Amino acid sequence: MTFYVKHLQRHNLLFMQSAGRKEGFRMGEEKGYYELSELLDLTEWQKLQDALAMSTKLAMVTSDYRGTPVTRGSNCSPFCLKARSDPFVSKYCYRCDSIGGLEAAKADGPYIYLCHMGIVDMAVPFMVGGKYTGALIAGQIKIADSHGENMPEQLVASKKSGPIV
């Protein structure tokens, strides 16, 4: 499930395909890390993210390795939009995105976690040459309480489509 360069090239979402961006890609190699904006056509990626969010009924955002969004949020809940618009609270949102992405990179696949607000999110890492460059964060799912406890494992076993509100 990890997004690899070959997969993105196949779908023409990488800038590496155009002569004007090859230099930027080499700069990333020299720095030892890559910025997603050096690798992805963010305009095309935003369209794909919007369509994926709409079809899955999940909220999505793509963030860099620091947890800073590089795309607009797609299909975001009003609660999370308000939280992310607050300068104080948004720092915690970005930190959760960063940690979720790092854990996904360590796991070499999707990682499901609770954010600081008790909402279920998942991160799918972008890896280039074995290095973590960012993640697709999806979710904003509120798990129905069972005796007052949030149980993220219900997300995996759930047969319901879309978020539980």
Image: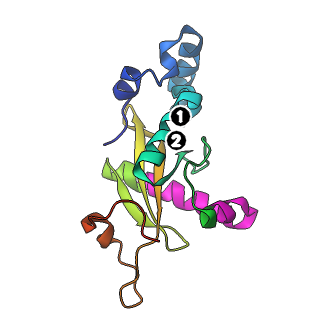
Magenta stretch in the rendered image: 81-102
Q: Which residue is mark 1?
A: 47
Determine contact: label 1, label 2, CB under 8 Å.
yes
At label 1, counting other C-alpha atoms closer than 10 Å, the crowd grade (few under 14, some 14-19, many 20 or more) is few
- Residue at x-position 40% and y-position 21%: 9
- Residue at x-position 68% and y-position 64%: 82
Q: Main secondary structure of the magenta part?
A: helix
Q: Secondary structure at mark 1?
A: helix
Residue 94: which numbered mark, if any? none
Up/down of 163 relative to 40, above or below: below
Q: Disc 1 to disc 2, how far (Cα)? A: 5 Å
Q: Is residue 33 visible?
A: no
x, y percent for residue 88: 73, 66
Q: Residue furthest top?
A: 19
**Is residue 56 or residue 15 the one in the foreground?**
56
Describe residue 81's horizontal placement relative to residue 46 as left or right: right
- Residue at x-position 36% and y-position 21%: 10
